Amino acid sequence: SVISQYQRDLLELVFIGDAPNRNKINLIIANEITPHLTASEYMDRGEYENEFKQVIGDTKAAYDISEQDSLIFGSQGLLVCGPRARDHEPLLCGYLQFNTLDIFLQNLFS
């Protein structure tokens, strides 16, 4: 297991026995995505956006972070794709740490 028994016990306490069904956040890093489009073209309210919704939840925004790389924000995670996608991993992991802490604190004080 990735987490200790203490951490599992804390999750059970905060999520009142429903820890397996807690909100989770995904970070998906892909070297390429087919077809290669601009970020705005992925946000088509159709086929492409529906594919993203299956893995990162409702799409919030999409950005071209270079000519080859795109970043798509969803309600349950992020998808970054392109040949230099891994270069952004440390920053995106930091962003997700703050998001997961926010989710945890909302559940702790609710």
Image: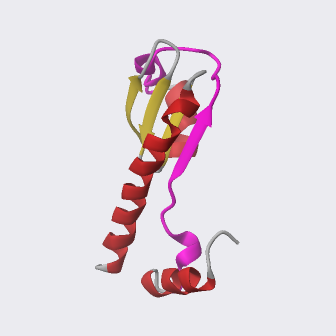
Q: Residue at x 66, y 69 (%)?
A: 2
33 drawn magenta: yes
Instruction: Tell me which residue sits at (51%, 44%) in the image.
Output: 56
Question: Which residue extends farthest left?
Answer: 109
- Quick check: 33 left or right of 106? right
Residue at (49%, 34%) from the top-left corner?
A: 88
The residue stretch that appears in magenta: 17-45
Quarter holding the C terminus is bottom left
In this view, the residue in front, 80 or 107, is 80
User: Left or right: 33 with respect to 46?
Assistant: right
Viewport quadrant of the N terminus: bottom right
> Residue 73: x, y in percent?
42, 38
Q: Position of residue 106 (x, y in %)?
A: 31, 71
Q: How is the image coloured?
A: secondary structure
Q: Is residue 48 above or below residue 11?
A: above
Q: Residue at x 40, y 28 (%)?
A: 62
Who is closer to the viewer here, 108 or 50?
Answer: 108
Q: Quadrant of residue 3?
A: bottom right
Q: Is residue 98 visible?
A: yes
Residue 26 painted magenta: yes
| Residue 8 drawn above or below residue 72 | below
Percent x, y for residue 38?
46, 15
